[in-house]
Image: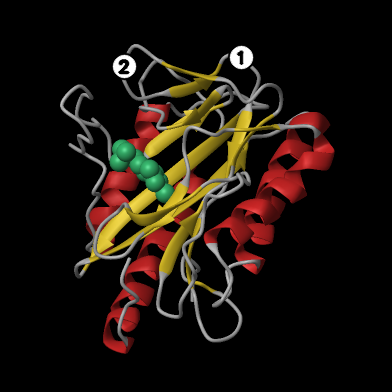
């Protein structure tokens, strides 16, 4: 992506703050007994209240993919990403629920994700969530001007590796700004010869580790969207949109 100008950064900051607010309010709505569909409806209503829209609903990345039918992604337990909230999926004590919220405001896109722990989550799964959030911050720490995309990827992989978790390889972080998905792609693992793009001040990136308690292998559900772990074990997902600066990275998807 082309680095944003100072004026564009002001708008991007505002768009990301609003996206963070939608995510935060929707996370607070998640509790035992609500359905994944209810969660999506709540997010829709919150977006309307805050005057932003969802670039996800109706999104069709290829002719063979059905249009995404929801406002946000709600992924429960073994669902890794892109979960389509249904009335059948009732949230239960001990579940983990990843909410991926992307919103557009005044022409700019904010993208952020958090995994919500519902009630008594087992220590093993709690740890998975902590490590995934830690991996996100490890990636953010490497997001400095002069570094390359591969530095972010390596930092995430190094943080996760000692825990033996699976790192999803088929989906990546990405540039984000005037559209939801821009160059460069940001894998959550290092691969020699890739991720050469240099980070420059004004670039805005979505960094988003997707980490599995067990194997990294995934399936796509028959709905054409929901990504699940093949072994049925849970996965966690955390994401922020950040700004590359001359100094420390600025996390944009935060409440002010
Ligand atoms: N944050 C997700 C991503 O970066 C959101 C995609 S939802 C979709 O891919 F429906 F729009 F695909
Ligand atoms: Co994203």
Q: Does residue 17 lie above or below 210 as drawn?
A: below
Mark 2 CB near ligand 1 (8 Å cut): no
Q: Which residue is mark 2?
A: 223
Q: Which mark is residue 33?
A: none
Give the structural element (helix, strand or loop) at label 2. Answer: loop
Residue depicted at 37% across the width and 27% down the height: 85
x and y, in percent, of residue 57 in the image: 22, 39
In which quadrant will I find the N terminus? bottom left
Across and down, in percent, residue 101 comes to 39, 49
* Residue displayed at 19% across by 67% down: 107
Q: Residue at x 35, y 51 (%)?
A: 102
Q: Can the viewer see residue 168?
A: yes
Q: Please state which of residues 210 and 115 is positioned toward the viewer in this rendering.
A: 210
- Image-quadrant location for residue 67: top left
Could you classify mark 1 by the number of other residues whose Cα lies within 10 Å: few (under 14), some (14-19), or many (20 or more)?
some
Of residues 187 and 226, the one drawn nearer to the viewer in this rendering: 187
Type of colouring: secondary structure
Quadrant containing ligand 1 reads: top left
Residue 105 image position (x, y, % from top left): 24, 65
**Element type at marker 1?**
loop
Alpha carbon distance from label 1 to label 2: 17 Å
Q: Is residue 30 left or right of residue 128?
A: left
Mark on residue 232? Answer: 1
Residue drawn at x 49%, y 76% is: 256
Residue 227's image quarter?
top left
Q: Is residue 168 above or below residue 196?
A: above
Q: Is residue 30 visible?
A: no
Which is more N-terminal, label 2 or label 1?
A: 2
- Between residue 113 and residue 191, name the one nearer to us: 191
Asked if residue 226 is positioned above or below residue 144 in the image, the reply reads above
């Amino acid at each position: 992506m082309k680095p944003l100008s100072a004026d564009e950064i002001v708008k991007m900051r505002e768009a990301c703050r609003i996206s963070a607010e939608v995510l935060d309010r929707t996370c607070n709505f998640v509790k035992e007994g609500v359905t994944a569909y209810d969660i999506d409806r709540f997010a829709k209503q919150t977006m309307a209240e805050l005057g932003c829209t969802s670039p996800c609903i109706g999104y069709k990345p290829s002719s063979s993919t059905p249009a995404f039918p929801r406002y946000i992604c709600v992924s429960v337990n073994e669902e890794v990403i892109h979960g389509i909230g249904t009335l059948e999926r009732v949230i239960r004590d001990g579940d983990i629920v990843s909410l991926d919220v992307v919103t557009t405001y005044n022409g700019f896109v904010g993208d952020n994700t958090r995994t919500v722990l519902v009630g008594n989550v087992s220590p093993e799964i709690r740890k998975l969530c902590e490590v995934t959030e830690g991996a996100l911050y490890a990636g953010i720490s490497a997001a400095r001007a002069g570094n390359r995309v591969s530095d972010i990827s390596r930092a995430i992989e190094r943080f996760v590796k000692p825990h033996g978790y699976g790192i999803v390889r088929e989906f990546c972080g990405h540039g984000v700004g005037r559209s939801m998905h821009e160059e460069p792609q940001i894998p959550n693992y290092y691969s020699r010869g890739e991720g050469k793009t240099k980070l420059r001040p004004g670039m805005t990136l979505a960094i988003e580790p997707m980490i599995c308690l067990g194997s990294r292998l995934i399936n796509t559900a028959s709905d054409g969207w929901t990504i699940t772990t093949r072994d049925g074990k849970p996965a966690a997902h955390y994401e922020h949109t950040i700004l590359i600066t001359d100094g420390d990275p600025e996390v944009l998807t935060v409440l002010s």
